[in-house]
């Protein structure tokens, strides 16, 4: 299995979950500008849309879209519980994944790019109440309570962009604590290190290490 990634991008969530699951997986870095993969492949031949993550299975099947990849990875080791095995828990995780993908991931990523600078304030007005909502729903260490799930990995990655997109995360103390908690998980740290990311800001954010 091969997972195509860019450093600190949304693909980091799949990278984290692959490590959490202990999967035998090859991580391939894609250059955002040239679409050249670190193994020499033309990434556009794998995903003509040009974006990561993409997962190539051992039989050559190509799977795109982060939320689908996360769910597929967990299906390989469902006993980990990163997606609950009861119907209500599964519905909740699917709802959270879709919320993060559409209400947080997209606008928070757009806030990173100069193209969206003219509407950055409007994007923030969209995102802030949604961060209020998700910050207020913690009843335990993770989004589901006491159990780590794929939704936590995805939220962690999107919130990590706050160091670059101008969102002041200190407005949401529960999210800062969440960042430290998830960032302290050994498999998460291993994925971050593999992408050349090191902690700063009391371990709340993870940015490229100088030598990476
Ligand atoms: N709908 C896709 C969007 C993925 C996406 O936005 N990927 C970004 C990184 S976070 C990317 O690769 N952008 C580069 C590009 O679009 O060329 C998903 O949810 O997986």
Image (cartoon, rainbow, N blue to C red):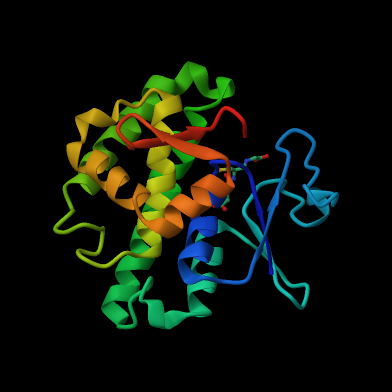
Please tell me in which quarter of the rendered image ligand 1 is found: top right
Q: Nearer the viewer, residue 11 or 80?
A: 80
Q: Residue drawn 56% across and 65% down?
A: 69
Q: Answer above or below: position of 24 versus 207.
A: below
Apparent side of residue 208 relative to residue 47 in the rendered image (left or right): left
The spot of residue 139 in percent (x, y) is: 14, 58
Q: Residue drawn 78% across and 72% down?
A: 60
Apparent side of residue 119 relative to residue 168 in the rendered image (left or right): right
Q: Residue drawn 70% across and 72% down?
A: 57
Q: Nearer the viewer, residue 82 or 109?
A: 82
Q: Residue drawn 49% across and 53% down?
A: 190
The spot of residue 189 in percent (x, y) is: 44, 50
The spot of residue 94 in percent (x, y) is: 38, 66
The spot of residue 117 in percent (x, y) is: 50, 18
When asked about the image quadrant of residue 123, the answer is top left
Apparent side of residue 10 relative to residue 80 in the rendered image (left or right): right
Q: Answer above or below: position of 209 versus 119.
A: below
Residue extending furthest toward the front: 211
Q: Quadrant of the C terminus?
A: top right
Q: Answer above or below: position of 17 versus 10.
A: below
């Amino acid at each position: 299995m091969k997972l195509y990634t860019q450093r600190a991008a949304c693909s980091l969530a799949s990278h984290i979950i692959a490590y959490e699951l202990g999967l035998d997986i090859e991580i391939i870095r894609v250059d955002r500008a040239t679409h050249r993969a670190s193994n020499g492949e033309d990434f556009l031949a794998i995903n003509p849309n040009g974006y990561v993550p993409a997962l190539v299975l051992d039989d050559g099947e190509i799977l795109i879209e982060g939320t689908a990849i996360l769910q597929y990875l967990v299906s390989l080791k469902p006993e980990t519980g990163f997606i609950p095995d009861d119907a209500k828990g599964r519905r909740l995780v699917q709802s959270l994944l879709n919320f993060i993908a559409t209400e947080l991931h997209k606008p928070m990523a757009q806030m990173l790019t100069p193209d969206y600078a003219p509407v950055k304030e409007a994007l923030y007005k969209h995102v802030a109440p949604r961060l209020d909502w998700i910050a207020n729903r913690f009843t335990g260490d993770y989004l589901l309570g006491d159990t780590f799930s794929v939704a936590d990995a995805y939220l962690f990655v999107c919130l990590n962009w706050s160091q670059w997109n101008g969102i002041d995360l200190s407005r949401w103390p529960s999210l800062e604590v969440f960042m430290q908690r998830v960032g302290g998980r050994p498999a998460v740290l291993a994925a971050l290190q593999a992408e050349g990311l090191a902690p700063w800001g009391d371990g709340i954010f993870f940015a490229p290490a100088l030598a990476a």
